[in-house]
Amino acid sequence: MAVTIKECLQLQLLEMEMLFSMFPNKGEISLQDKNALSYVQMYLKNIKEGLPPRIEYSISVDIDEPKRRAYRKEGESTLNPFGRRGGGDLWAEYGNIPTVSPPPRMTAVKVDLHVSLPHSYPHSAPQLFARSNALDRQNQLQLNKHLTSHISSLDLGELCVCAAVQWVRDNSASYFQNSNVSFETAPKEKAVKIIFHRMWIYSHHIYRQELKKKIFDCAKQLNLTGFCLTGKPGIICVEGLKENCEEFWHVIRYPNWKHISCKHVESTETEGNGDKLHLFRTFEDLQFQAHGDYGLRNDYHMDLGQFLEFLKQHQIAANTVKGMIK
């Protein structure tokens, strides 16, 4: 009795369920077309008439690769551990003592098994290809040649992808031993170092709204944190990447801000993005109650006592900015 395509596809879905139970973690099985299984199910339910696309996927298989370390290098003389006894040399008496190797040291590597299923599988052979970055081309070709030979020895009509996975697990280690590619010596990703910068900027005063807008827009564009204290005096603190802080300083000074100076700079080399070095989470607009009664006048002095309390809350030493406050 001829086997129908629908019967083959039902078996393929059954095998996929088994594989998902064997590889439950995210990323262990990657479908080339994420909707392929849904298309097959719709075809089996007669919702779609045309043949669904092939089921194609890859399985990430963990392999334990044995690596042997000899106690001595090849060609290196081995010392006689017994020394001389009774004027005779046991080395001469018993001959050269062989080099002893410890048990294999196991190191996990991965083999990606790529699978493409014809509609008539398992009554026709699946297309399988195994690859790993830790294998050179010659050993990868040998691995796939022997895998194909093993699958060809199985009876048609039997689901065999699970058997292929088990064969890869059981037989791949020897190909890694002979490979010229050393996965152990692959360079580790170097941690990126940055210069974290903090600038303390003093101005005689900051009143104008257009100037404040320029300050806040520039800090936002350059991803800087800190604060701007408006009034008299005006104090700005920016922190972030060194190049961004320097760009901020260049932008706000020009073309015509004369009464402004950078009073203090803190600079630290660090790895990563420097998040742990930030004293501020955002760029804040500081406006404390003016000291005294200035009515409608615009030259009010900010209450610097409140400002120093703000610095204390952010664990900033008062002497950091006292020198810039007139």
Image: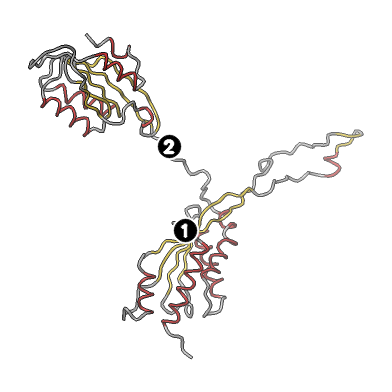
- Give the quarter of the image for residue 169: bottom right
Reply above or below: 313 against 175: above
Q: Is residue 227 visible?
A: yes
Badge 1 amino acid:
Glu
- Please tell me which residue is depicted at 73% across the width and 45% down the height of the picture: 100
Residue 201, given in percent of the width and then of the height, sits at: 23, 18
Tag 2 residue: 190
In screen coordinates, is 237 left or right of 276? left
Judge by depth and name the residue closer to the eye, 280 or 133.
280
> In the image as oriented, which residue stretches furthest toward the left?
296
Q: Residue at x 76, y 36 (%)?
A: 79
* Towards the viewer: 156 or 292: 292
Other-residue count near label 1 (Cα within 10 Å), few / some / many at <14 / 14–19 / ≥20:
some
The disc placed on residue 28 is: 1
Residue 63 appears at what percent x and percent y? 56, 56
Q: Indicate whether 73 appears above or below 196.
A: below
Q: Amino acid at mark 2?
A: Lys
The answer to whether residue 138 is seen in the rendering is no
